[in-house]
Image: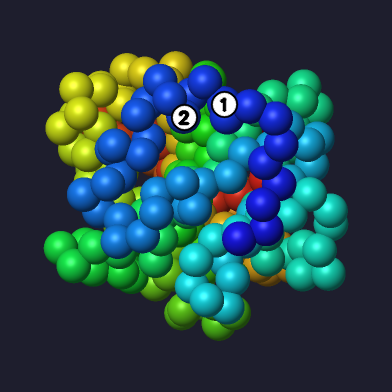
Amino acid sequence: MSRLASGNIPEIINELHIESVFAPSCSTDVASCYDYSSDSDLYAYDTKYSYSDWENSTPSFVNKTFHIINNNKNQIVLLQIDHKLMTAKNWTPGGTADCALMTNQIFTMVEFKTNAFSEDKIKNNAKNAKEQLHKTYKKIVRLFRDQGIDLRSFFPIQELYVVFDATLGVTSARADIMNLTMQPKNAKMPPTFFENKREY
């Protein structure tokens, strides 16, 4: 992992008992599966090793990244979920959201589908990505609940993101994608967005 961490561990890590929460689902050292940074621009992406990472400089493959805009220099935490925090024998890798990003106020989960280019694959991946995000969110909520933490009420803002190659223009504004962003009024799931960036 490209460690960007400097200074003290963010309070949110300790407040949420991150290492205890993910101990049942992680087959390695939990502390090696998260990073934090207050850089003004961060770029999260899916690596060739099937887990997520980030950089604080614009990569050559920026079109395949999720741009974290951090003009206020907030401390942002990256949680590597798929193939990292969820790798224990009872947690099958794959079919799991790639990563989560959080501040004291915002919790977002991200699923990358940046290798889809045909229309059929884009539509299928869009639907599958939303399902992956929902499934992973439920698992994570349960892990936190087992430690006595109500994740749903902890963060005022919670959102789910699906990231396609930015050159394709697959965003929430597309008519066929817009339907996937709509949530029932009584849904316990955060809203899903199809975007390549967010301001934190």
**Amino acid type at mark 2:** Ile
- Where residue 178 appears, as percent x and y from the top left, is 48, 48
In percent of the image, x 37 and y 35: which residue is there? Answer: 18
Most foreground residue, 177 or 199: 199
In the rendered image, which quarter is residue 86 located in?
bottom left
In which quadrant will I find the N terminus? Answer: bottom right
Most foreground residue, 185 or 3: 3
- Where residue 87 appears, as percent x and y from the top left, is 30, 64
Does the image show residue 111? yes
In which quadrant will I find the C terminus? Answer: top right
**Mark 2 burial class by Cα count in 10 Å: few <14, some 14-19, many 20+:** some
Tell me the tag on residue 102. none
- Where residue 170 appears, as percent x and y from the top left, is 61, 60
Tell me the tag on residue 13. 2
Does the image show residue 198? no
In the rendered image, which quarter is residue 5 located in?
top right
Q: Secondary structure at mark 2?
A: helix
In percent of the image, x 83 and y 69: which residue is there? Answer: 60
Q: Which residue is mark 1?
A: 10
In this image, 18 relative to 148: left or right? right
**Amino acid type at mark 1:** Pro
In percent of the image, x 23 and y 68: which residue is there? Answer: 92
Tell me whether the residue at label 1 lies in contact with that at label 2, contact meaning CB atoms closer than 8 angstroms. Answer: yes
Most foreground residue, 39 or 175: 39
In this image, 185 relative to 107: left or right? left
The Cα–Cα distance between marks 1 and 2, rounded to whole angstroms, is 6 Å
- Where residue 192 appears, as percent x and y from the top left, is 44, 43
In this image, 118 relative to 151: left or right? right
Q: Secondary structure at mark 1?
A: loop
